[in-house]
Image: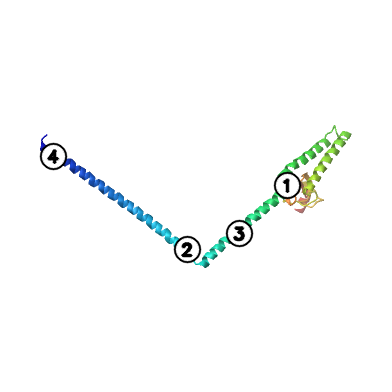
Amino acid sequence: MDKKEFDENIDKSTSEDDKLNTQTTDNDDVNQESEDENLETEKIDDENLETEKIEDEKLNPEDELETLKDKLARTFAEMENQRRRFEKEREDAYEYGGFSFAKETLNLLDNLERSKAALENDEELKDTEALKKIVEHLDIINNDMLSIFKKNNIEPVKSINEKLDPNLHQAMMEVEDDTKEPGTIVQEIQKGFMMKDRLLRPSLVGVSKKTAKEDQNEG
């Protein structure tokens, strides 16, 4: 390679480097412009926030006072509601804390009555002294439990000869009986109980209805 060719290669390389440097400079300028635009946008946002803050601060004293009064009233109302709820929950816990326990205990009374009925219907035990003593003991236990319930404001629901009340009674069957007004309870299948003013469980009952012959005559 002679000197002339060598110099031409050097010039060519130098020209390409200049071109690359120019392109890099252009890219740097574009990036710088983008950063400047972002900074300008952030500056505008900050200015808007400052403007809103200043506008809020420009509320006149009367409006600000009314706003504070409203917030204070709402806070006091919420506190009062919470206090009332707490008082109600505390009273319910005191008055009806044993509600679930009492409801479960009713099963003991049911089992006592079933046991008594089963023994009384046993042909081998009927009219025996052993049966009389067993029934007496079962009655004592049953009465003691009813007494304990009463001390805790748990009492049986009145059913026999009462009008059917859907809030206290659940009709399980109808019994033809012309001596009673239709809808009168003539049979109690399972006792219901109240705990103060709350229903522990409804009474399962049978209610009277007119005989079929009388219904036909009326028809």
Tag in front: 1 or 3: 3
| Label 4, label 2: how far apart the Cα atoms are | 74 Å
Residue 110 rendering spot, x and y as whole percentages: 77, 40
Question: Is residue 81 rendered to the left or right of residue 68?
Answer: right
Q: Quadrant of residue 43?
A: bottom left
* Residue 186 in view in this figure: no
Cβ–Cβ below 8 Å for labels 2 and 3? no
Answer whether residue 24 is visible to the viewer in this image: yes
Q: Amino acid at mark 4?
A: Asp
Q: Which residue is mark 4?
A: 7
| Amino acid beneath label 2 | Glu
The residue wearing badge 2 is: 57
Residue under numbered circle 3: 76
On the picture, is 10 further left or further right than 210? left
Q: Nearer the viewer, mark 1 or mark 2?
A: 2
Separation of marks 1 and 2 at Cα, in angstroms? 61 Å
Mark toward the start of the polypeptide (4 vs 3): 4
Q: Earlier in the sequence, mark 2 or mark 3?
A: 2
Along the polypeptide, which appears first: circle 1 or circle 2? 2
